[in-house]
Amino acid sequence: MSQPILFGIPNCDTVRKARKWLDDQGQAHEFIDLRADTPSTQKITEWLAVVGPDRLINRRSTTFKQLSQGDKAALEDDGAVSVLQAQPTLIKRPVLEWNSTVSVGFKAEEYAQLFDI
């Protein structure tokens, strides 16, 4: 069994809650800062394929509201990967990868089910 990888931004409240929950459960994990280590095109493509754009793209974020109409339109088609790579704060947080599972956002109940706790 591999170690879970949590992608997020350190100062995000939801990411903090997820990290605390994992720590409280004694679940070792790797943390990757989306700003410091932008996910690859391949990684974003995989996430979009697994969870879909409606789940992965944070349309309520300040970053989304500040996007040009062209970038917003690109998020609706094949340009989503390049926009998400250029603006990683558009990715809803946290993204948790574990084994073959990808989870977006944090709910303690979902994490407990995922980790069979």
Image (cartoon, rainbow, N blue to C red):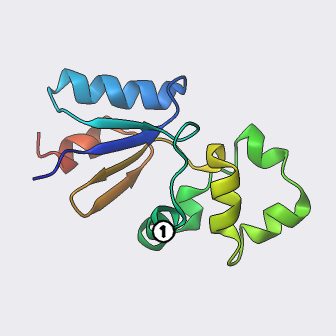
Depth check: 43 or 73 in front? Answer: 43
Instruction: Give the residue pinned by disc 1.
Output: 42
Amino acid type of disc 1?
A: Gln
Left/right placement of residue 110 relative to residue 44 reads left
Residue at x 58% of width, y 50% of height: 91
Left/right placement of residue 59 relative to residue 91 reads right
Residue at x 28% of width, y 60% of height: 101
Q: Where residue 113 sits in the image (x, y, percent)?
A: 19, 47
Q: Where residue 38 sits in the image (x, y, percent)?
A: 55, 48
- Can you say whether 2 is above or below 32 in the image? below
Left/right placement of residue 24 relative to residue 47 reads left
Depth check: 3 or 36 in front? Answer: 36
- Can you say whether 72 is above or below 95 in the image? below
Q: Where residue 68 sits in the image (x, y, percent)?
A: 89, 56
Residue at x 9% of width, y 53% of height: 1
Work out which quarter of the rendered image holds the C terminus and state it. Answer: top left
